[in-house]
């Protein structure tokens, strides 16, 4: 992205608002001194959103489109607050696997990212099984002597 026309906070906001999607967070090397503080200020004001994107390993900023915002009923908010996330990774993985099974039962397919994660989990289990078998075999041969 080019930031040649951006030299202050207001111009940055106008530039972000003109975008259709998102933009990697600009650095001072790309724009002007103090752009980081201006991005933080715009986020605090609620003018833009800034999220970390693991794929590009950087923050990404989005324009805040007021016309796309929805009003959420209080009962939905209360249900959200009552829903507690799992307290351990094992419980989380169990919930994710169960949800995946339910979605597959309904005919929905997982995303590529979920499929890759599921495949990685299977490989890790297989690897643990191999190591476990090797350890058992080694202990058996040691105990025979």
Image (spheres, rainbow, N blue to C red):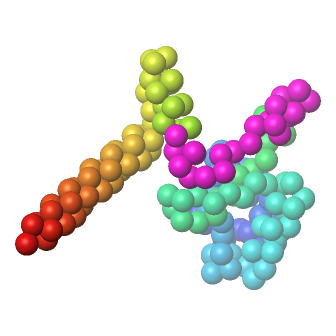
Question: Would you say 104 lies left or right of 77 here?
Answer: left
Say above or below: 20 vs 31. Answer: above
Number of numbered markers: 0
Question: Would you say 132 lies left or right of 97 here?
Answer: left
Can you give x and y, in whole percent of width and height, for residue 142 in the image?
Answer: 13, 71
Say above or below: 70 vs 123. Answer: above
Is 84 a magenta residue? yes
Is 31 a magenta residue? no
* Furthest residue toward left: 145
Can you give x and y, in whole percent of width and height, for residue 105 in the image?
Answer: 45, 18
**Residue at figure coordinates x 50%, y 24% from the top left:** 103
Residue range (magenta): 69-94
**Residue at figure coordinates x 78%, y 79% from the top left:** 34
Can you give x and y, in whole percent of width and height, for residue 57 in the image?
Answer: 54, 65
Give the quarter of the image for residue 80: top right
**Residue at figure coordinates x 8%, y 72% from the top left:** 145
Q: Is residue 69 visible?
A: no
Can you give x and y, in whole percent of width and height, for residue 99 in the image?
Answer: 54, 31
| Front position in the image: 46 or 9 | 46
| Front position in the image: 17 or 41 | 41
Q: Is residue 90 visible?
A: yes
């Amino acid at each position: 992205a080019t930031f040649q026309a951006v030299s202050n906070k207001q111009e940055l906001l106008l530039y972000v608002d003109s975008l259709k999607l998102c933009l990697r967070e600009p650095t001072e090397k790309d724009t002007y001194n103090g752009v980081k503080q201006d991005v933080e200020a715009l986020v605090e004001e609620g003018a833009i959103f800034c999220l970390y994107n693991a794929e590009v390993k950087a923050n990404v900023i989005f324009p805040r489109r007021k016309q796309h915002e929805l009003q959420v009923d209080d009962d939905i908010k209360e249900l959200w607050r009552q829903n507690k996330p799992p307290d351990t990774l094992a419980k989380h993985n169990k919930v994710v696997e169960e949800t995946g099974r339910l979605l597959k039962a309904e005919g929905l397919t997982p995303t590529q990212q979920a499929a890759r994660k599921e495949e990685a989990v299977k490989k890790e289990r297989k690897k643990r099984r191999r190591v476990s078998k090797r350890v058992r075999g080694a202990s058996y041969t040691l105990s025979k002597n």
